[in-house]
Image: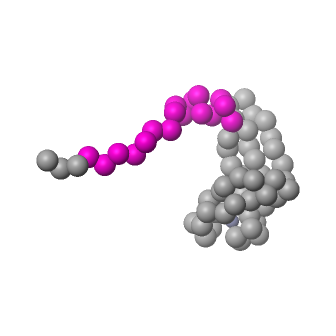
Amino acid sequence: MLLITCPATRSDELVADRCIRAVTNHPTHIAMHVECPACGRTHVYRTGRKLAAATGPVREARVPIPA
Ligand SMILES: [Zn+2]
């Protein structure tokens, strides 16, 4: 299972592994083609260790509290 955000409906969808249509290996990332349960189209998501290394670790969003 994986969680995707549909670019058409902007909704978060939990997707089963069988909805992954193709996985393509690229030098900088892995492209995952996922059939979307929300709109029925196929979306491409980039993932992989090398992409995380290129974009840096996910930073926690912090909102400063005014003094
Ligand atoms: Zn979609």
Above/below status of 44 relative to 59: below
Residue 34 visible within the image: no
**How many marks can you see?**
0
Residue 60 visible within the image: yes
Residue that appears at 65% across and 29% down: 50
Q: Does the magenta stretch include residue 34?
A: no
The stretch of residues the image draws in magenta is 48-64
Above/below status of 21 relative to 50: below
Taking 6 as reference, is 59 left or right?
A: left
Residue 15: which quarter of the image? bottom right
Residue that appears at 35% across and 45% down: 62
Taking 45 as reference, is 23 left or right?
A: right
Query: Quarter containing ligand 1?
Result: bottom right
Residue that appears at 81% across and 44% down: 23
Taking 47 as reference, is 54 left or right?
A: left
Q: Where residue 25 sits in the image (x, y, percent)?
A: 78, 36
